[in-house]
Image (spheres, helix red, strand yellow):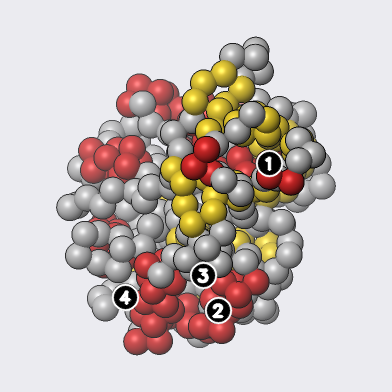
Amino acid sequence: MLTTQTAHASTRVRLRDYPYPYRSAIAISNDCEFTSWETQLSLYRSLSGKNGLGLEISNSLFFFVTNSLCHSTFSYFQGTSDVPTAYAPVLREMIRAGYIDTVHAYGDFDDGTFQRRYAERIADECQRMGLALVAWSNHGSDRNFQNLGHRRLTQYQQGDNPDHPCYHLDLLKGMGVCYHWVDDGYTPKPGDETPILYHEEARDGRGLILFRRYRGLVGQSAPTASRLPEQVLLSDIDSIVANGRACIVYQHFGCWQKTSEGMFEANQPPYFSPEGMRVLERLAEISREGKCLVATVGRLLRYLEARDAVAFTVSNNEIMVSSASVGIGPQDLAGVTFYAPDPERMRLTWRAKDGATHALPSRVFRESETGQPCIGVPWKKLEAFQW
């Protein structure tokens, strides 16, 4: 992050780590295995809806299903056909509203039957319907050749390999995908100093912006709803807040547990144990108190990328913001906030790469605990809908 400012003490400005008033950030990256349509709607209503906890939690989506492993997951298309399901219109609303923001591969192709034509069909549907999903997450077993790798991850993953018939990475940008989770993207502890965003080169030469998720449950099966209170301790949440960290939690809310026989149980009401609900309620508490930004995966990743990519200069009571990153523009600056000694007299301005400038929408804030003043582009929560 590059900064330039005049030497006079009265103009010293620094970038705040998180949108005002938050001091930390958490997102839940919820892969959609075993999620029935009824569970999808019920979880949205209880966690994010107008009468729920008020948590901004997004979900991922299978466009196709084979049911070779995920026996109960809903999808956008019927099976592997080109026919949309009855859920497709509401799914489009959820995508546009930001509550579905991740392509969980293209479906549960655990039978090894993925073909590039499935990705082409989805890319066409997204373009035709004006849909954008900003994140991708790999899925399932080593028969999912659709999964993405990179030059240092070249096992079964073939989605980025242009010499393989399952190659599809060239299509993802047209679906709006900017951030990718692949099989080496883990952080060892919740909210440690490991950067969430990192970069690798795909085998087709494209640069990948990858993100890390916190898995926990070391040596055990992937996290499910029943394991939430073991995966994320209340003390983990308190530590994230106290240390001013960010964390993306990997979960499968649609799955209750993996049985001793190796089978998976789909989640059913009430969906969470009392201990699991306490974890979610704590997230709601710290969000309401302004201690922690609880945001969708896509919005948090975009904020972190923008925050780390902006440069600014300060002169004549103006903070001029710019970015060398081709992916960051003024529309991506929601939440970007600066500590400034006299923000009432300052203005925020964006400078484009061609030198053109225009004012950014800004507000003046004051830290409740320290009284320290700041100015920034306001962060707004997603609107809750009555689905």
Q: Is residue 121 visible?
A: no
- Residue under numbered circle 3: 369
- Say which residue label 1 marks: 11
Q: Nearer the viewer, mark 3 or mark 2?
A: 3
Q: Is residue 314 above or below residue 228?
A: above
Which amino acid lies under the numbered mark 1 shown in the image of this protein?
Answer: Thr
State how far apart marks 2 and 1 are (Cα): 34 Å
Asked if disc 2 and disc 1 are in contact, CB closer than 8 Å, the reply is no
Residue at the spot of label 2: 238
Task: Report x, y in % for residue 242.
Answer: 60, 75
Q: Nearer the viewer, mark 1 or mark 4?
A: 1
Q: Amino acid at mark 4?
A: Tyr
Q: Nearer the viewer, residue 104 or 26?
A: 26
The amino acid beneath tag 2 is Asp
Closer to the chain start, of discs 3 and 2, is 2
Using the image, tell me which numbered label, if any, was put on residue 342. none
Q: Image quadrant of residue 76?
A: top left
| Disc on the earlier residue, 1 or 3 | 1
Of discs 2 and 1, which sits in the foreground?
Answer: 1
Looking at marks 2 and 1 on the same chain, the residue that comes earlier in the sequence is marked by 1
Dot 4 alpha-carbon crowd within 10 angstroms: few under 14, some 14 to 19, many 20 or more: many
Q: Residue at x 62, y 54 (%)?
A: 17
